[in-house]
């Protein structure tokens, strides 16, 4: 039997998991609404909270949708849909899948036809994210206690510590931009696109801070991603 990344079986498994997660979300939504009424919170406040939360979830969902579309080129739709709608993070799933595919000399522009290669990518995406789950489950309280202790003793160094951890995480992904720099001008294309994305994010930051455009806080990430993706087309034509 020929393998397909878009087989009906994969769609069925993915749909089953996604429906279960949606049902779980609906269950806790109803429980939360009932508890809010017991606490004396008005129905108008509950509806306003639900509506505002739903609107704020649109912006991150756009970024996730872009990740699903990108991964679906070679992994099909079911696996990216499952990973990014339930457990996975865009900042991890995309590098994990593309790095594994590149290491196996697979094309990122056409569906994978080898079941073993597909399985290897799925295992890398899965095993790589599992340690984080257990770290949060068993170590989050202790880690938070340590961070709060640092911030309590010296707020300035506490902020520097948090920023340093964030920059350390980003550095791991930034290194991928320079992976093909030895290939000449084409290797510079990802760097140029990343700089364009950073520039767009910088403009959004200025609008938020200086012009008080607060609604842009939730949409800065997808705007910078969409802008960079659109800019990558002329950049590739000019440099490729």
Image (cartoon, rainbow, N blue to C red):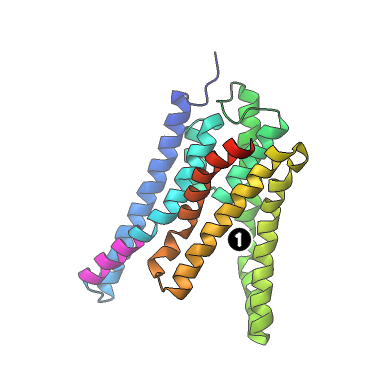
Looking at this view, name the residue that lies furthest to the bottom: 153
Whole-percent x, y for residue 109 in the image: 57, 29
Is residue 219 in sight in this rendering?
Answer: yes
Q: Quadrant of the N terminus?
A: top right
Secondary structure category for the residue under label 1: helix
Judge whether residue 66 is colored magenta: no
Is residue 149 in sight in this rendering?
Answer: no
Whole-percent x, y for residue 189 in the image: 64, 43
Which quadrant would residue 134 be assigned to in this image?
Answer: bottom right
Residue at the spot 59% in from the left edge and 44% down from the top edge: 93
Q: Quadrant of the C terminus?
A: top right
Whole-percent x, y for residue 228 in the image: 53, 48
Looking at this view, name the residue that lies furthest to the right: 182
Judge whether residue 47 is colored magenta: yes
Q: Which residues are magenta?
A: 44-54
Callout 1 crowding tier (Cα within 10 Å): few <14, some 14–19, many ≥20 = few
Above or below, 83 against 47 in this view is above
Looking at this view, name the residue that lies furthest to the front: 238
Main SS category, magenta section: helix
In the rendered structure, the answer to whether residue 113 lies left or right of residue 63 reads right
């Amino acid at each position: 039997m020929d393998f397909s990344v878009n087989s009906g079986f994969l769609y069925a498994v993915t749909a089953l998991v996604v429906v279960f997660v949606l049902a779980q979300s609906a269950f806790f939504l109803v429980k939360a609404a009932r508890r809010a009424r017991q606490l004396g919170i008005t129905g108008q406040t509950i509806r306003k909270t639900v509506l505002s939360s739903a609107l704020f979830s649109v912006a991150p969902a756009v970024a996730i949708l872009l990740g699903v579309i990108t991964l679906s080129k070679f992994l099909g739709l079911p696996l990216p849909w499952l990973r990014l709608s339930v457990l996975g993070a865009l900042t991890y799933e995309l590098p994990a899948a593309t790095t594994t595919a590149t290491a196996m000399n697979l094309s990122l522009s056409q569906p994978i036809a080898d079941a073993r290669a597909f399985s290897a990518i799925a295992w890398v995406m899965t095993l790589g994210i599992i340690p984080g789950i257990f770290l949060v489950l068993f170590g989050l309280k202790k880690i938070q206690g340590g961070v709060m202790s640092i911030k309590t003793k010296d707020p300035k160094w506490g902020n520097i510590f948090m920023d340093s951890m964030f920059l350390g995480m980003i550095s791991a992904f930034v290194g991928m931009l320079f992976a093909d720099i030895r290939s000449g001008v084409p290797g510079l294309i990802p760097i140029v696109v990343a700089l364009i994305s950073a520039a767009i994010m910088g403009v959004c930051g200025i609008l938020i801070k200086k012009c008080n455009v607060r609604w842009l806080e939730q949409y800065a990430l997808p705007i910078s991603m969409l802008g960079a993706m659109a800019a990558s087309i002329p950049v590739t034509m000019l440099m490729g």
